[in-house]
Image: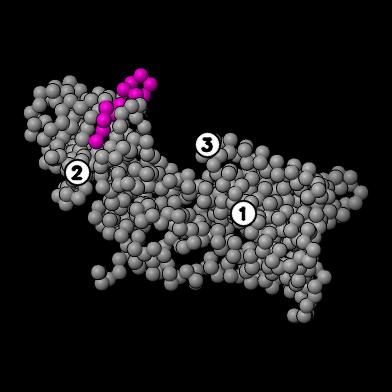
């Protein structure tokens, strides 16, 4: 008996003008596992994430979260339900400090956004927690720096810290290590590995570092032109003929 | 638990220790002190009038800045809420046979209810329409309020307006003991009421922008879709801001009416007031809150004294017609002054000073 999938899509489709970016997609992610989504540029990976986290609404089809239909819910509601998202293009609050970026996420998590009669620094637990999270991604030394002054790699780390602050049930990681300097990558991998090993959260990961995906993933789904051409264990995927063909034919970027 | 405090803990402790010792805090205390003793030092009515109006408009402008500078919402009905407050207290005191304290409180409650309901209605429009339409819509609403005040003569007295008397120690005929050679009177009491209320309202606004909610508003300004992705429903936050600022504006309207003891459609509902509020925000600096004080002071002081300064200057050349003519056009000079301020202080006075000091936001 299979458990209820953490994330499930049913015939999920979105068209931009005449172009179908995600095409009748049926995807099912078992709870507390890590599924990677790979596929060539423009395959629809980011679009799929946008559909799951609510930035886009589908032309047709459904998105289920723990068996519940969330297709019509807005982004904020989904975030509050526990669907957390990191973005392929860095998406932070540039003129706020690094700490404040994370603190705001914690504020969202703790639901104290509507408090207007207390000074925001009078919530020391939020600041301390934010600092701890920055430590996890090795960014704590820059806590008081304005986020826009961080290097690209550091901003990626900040993005992860923001995501962790939300303490989501499902993490959608869109190329978390893209643009990071090589020495920073293992740290982020460790974090992802740790989350996976704790088996308390479900992870959907888009990445192009192939060896990384092979070791991290429980399952891999291969996307091409908005369709899944293969969804299986890393072993099976790497031996799948259609996948090899797609990769040789369609640019080698996962 | 860690033994040595982390950098954040240290920073927080530092900030707490300095909170009531910082230069800004001391400056604020000094301003309050000066406003409190001013009537004793310069016992001129014009001077007191200017001070009282600066205090009131500093609050109105700061509450407008809360919307424009902190959330990017351009609400032209802000001046209307000011009028709602003014007319509430005027009508209630005018129609009550023996005006008392409770009538002022009642006016406060009524104007709060009206402004909260109206601003909620406005907010629901802001969900549906684009920013520019929102601005137009609120402008139309404000104009409607003006027309209503003019046309509904049986209630408002139309263009003639309403004059009324204040109860108890606020009544202009009340006189009390003498302190330091200055006799306490009704006007002075209203002045101090304005001072106390303005300090509280301003402090409330400052607290609002530095609260968790204020931080969310800031993050919406900064990166709205990221804020949403954190789980904040931005619409709800914007409603809060609109309602809060409208409520404060209407309370300031009450203070204004109490100071003048007279309201008419042009003195509290005219679009010129809204324009003045906008100018004050721009002069002081958008999104600074404290700029509201500078903007209000600048505008009210020049409005009051620029004409007489020009007159005095022109009196040196009584026979030169062109100088006489030029001196009458004080608004022209005000316009030039305004253009200069905007040119040299594009972020407003406070904004420019902050930028020079390189302050963190
Ligand atoms: N908002 C949009 N409007 C129009 N077309 C879009 C939009 N978003 C995505 N697309 C199109 O959908 C297709 C899939 O894009 P998507 O960003 O999902 O690809 P991807 O798999 O994430 O690629 P990459 O590896 O480059 O990140 C592309 O052809 C893209 O141009
Ligand atoms: Mg992508």
Q: Is residue A158 left or right of residue B42?
A: left
Which residue bears the numbered disc 2? A31
Answer above or below: position of A19 versus A64: above
Answer above or below: position of B49 versus B82: below
Q: Where does residue A143 sit, x and y in percent of width and height?
A: 33, 57
Predominant SS of the magenta segment: strand
Question: Which chain is disc 1 placed on?
Answer: B
Question: Which chain is disc 3 placed on?
Answer: B
Write the residue at 25% across / 44% down. A170
> Label 3 crowding class (10 Å Cα cut-off): few <14, some 14-19, many 20+?
few
Write the residue at 53% across / 65% down. B24
State the image quarter where residue B62 is shown.
Answer: bottom right
Mark 3 or mark 1, which is nearer the start of the sequence?
A: 1
Q: Quadrant of the N terminus of chain B?
A: bottom left
Give SS at disc 1.
Answer: helix
State the image quarter where residue B332 is shown.
Answer: top right
Q: Where does residue B257 sit, x and y in percent of width and height?
A: 73, 58
Q: Is mark 2 within 8 Å of ligand 1?
A: no
Residue range corresponding to the magenta coloring: A8-20
Which residue bears the numbered disc 3? B128
Q: Is mark 1 within 8 Å of ligand 1?
A: no
A162 and B47: which is toward the camera: A162
Answer above or below: position of B179 versus B173: below
Q: CA distance from mark 1 to mark 3?
A: 24 Å
Q: Quadrant of ligand 1?
A: top left
> Label 1 crowding class (10 Å Cα cut-off): few <14, some 14-19, many 20+?
some
B90 and A131: which is toward the camera: B90
> Label 2 crowding class (10 Å Cα cut-off): few <14, some 14-19, many 20+?
some
Give SS at disc 3.
Answer: helix
Which residue bears the numbered disc 1? B113
The answer to whether residue B343 is seen in the rendering is: no
Check chain identity for marks 2 and 1: say if they share one: no
């Amino acid at each position: 008996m299979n458990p209820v999938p953490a994330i499930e899509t049913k015939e999920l489709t979105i068209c931009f003008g005449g172009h179908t970016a995600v095409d009748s997609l049926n995807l099912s992610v078992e709870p507390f596992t890590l599924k990677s989504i790979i596929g060539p540029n423009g395959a629809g990976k980011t679009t799929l994430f946008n559909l799951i986290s609510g930035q886009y609404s589908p032309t047709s089809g459904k998105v289920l979260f723990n068996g519940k239909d969330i297709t019509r819910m807005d982004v904020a509601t989904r975030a509050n339900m526990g669907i957390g998202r990191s973005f392929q293009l860095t998406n932070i609050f540039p003129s706020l400090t690094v700490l404040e970026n994370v603190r705001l996420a914690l504020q969202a998590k703790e639901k104290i956004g509507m408090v207007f009669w207390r000074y925001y620094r009078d919530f020391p637990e939020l600041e301390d927690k934010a600092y701890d999270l920055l430590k996890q991604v090795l960014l704590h030394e820059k806590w008081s720096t304005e986020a826009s002054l961080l290097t690209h790699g550091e901003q990626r780390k900040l993005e992860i810290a923001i995501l962790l602050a939300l303490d989501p049930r499902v993490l959608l990681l869109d190329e978390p290590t893209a643009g990071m300097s090589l020495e920073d990558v293992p740290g982020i991998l460790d974090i992802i590995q740790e989350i996976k090993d704790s088996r308390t959260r479900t992870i959907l990961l888009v990445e192009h570092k192939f060896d990384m995906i092979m070791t991290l993933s429980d399952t891999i789904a291969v996307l091409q032109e908005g369709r899944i051409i293969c969804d299986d264990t890393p072993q099976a995927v790497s031996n799948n003929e259609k996948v090899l063909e797609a990769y040789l034919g369609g640019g080698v970027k996962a | 638990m860690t033994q040595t405090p982390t950098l954040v803990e240290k920073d927080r402790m530092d900030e707490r220790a300095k909170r009531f010792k910082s230069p800004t805090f001391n400056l604020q205390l000094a301003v309050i002190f000066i406003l409190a003793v001013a009537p004793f030092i310069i016992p001129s009515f014009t001077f007191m009038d200017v001070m009282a109006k600066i205090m009131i408009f500093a609050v109105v402008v700061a509450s407008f800045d809360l919307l424009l500078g902190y959330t990017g919402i351009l609400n032209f009905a802000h001046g209307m809420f000011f009028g709602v407050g003014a007319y509430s207290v005027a009508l209630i005191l005018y129609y009550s046979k023996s005006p008392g304290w409770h009538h002022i409180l009642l006016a406060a409650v009524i104007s709060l209810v009206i402004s909260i309901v109206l601003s909620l209605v406005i907010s629901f429009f802001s969900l549906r329409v684009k920013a520019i339409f929102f601005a137009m819509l609120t402008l139309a609403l404000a104009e409607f309020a003006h027309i209503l005040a003019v046309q509904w003569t049986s209630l408002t007295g139309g263009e003639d307006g309403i004059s009324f008397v204040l109860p108890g120690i606020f009544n202009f005929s009340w006189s009390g003991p003498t302190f330091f050679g200055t006799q306490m009177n009704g006007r002075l009491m209203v002045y101090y009421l304005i001072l106390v209320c303005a300090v509280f309202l301003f402090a409330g606004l400052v607290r609002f922008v530095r609260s968790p909610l204020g931080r969310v508003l800031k993050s919406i300004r900064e990166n709205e879709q990221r804020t949403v992705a954190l789980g904040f429903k931005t619409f709800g936050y914007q409603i809060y801001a609109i309602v809060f600022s409208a409520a404060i504006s209407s309370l300031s309207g009450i203070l204004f009416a109490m100071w003048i003891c007279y309201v008419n459609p042009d003195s509290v509902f005219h679009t010129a007031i809204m324009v003045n509020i906008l100018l004050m925000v721009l002069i002081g600096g958008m999104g600074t809150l404290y700029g509201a004080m500078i903007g209000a002071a600048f505008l009210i002081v020049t409005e009051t004294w620029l004409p007489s300064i020009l007159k005095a200057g022109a009196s040196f050349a009584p026979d030169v017609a062109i100088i006489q003519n030029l001196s009458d056009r004080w608004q022209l000079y005000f316009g030039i002054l305004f253009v200069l301020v905007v040119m040299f202080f594009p972020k407003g006075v406070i904004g420019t000073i902050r930028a020079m000091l390189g302050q963190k936001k």
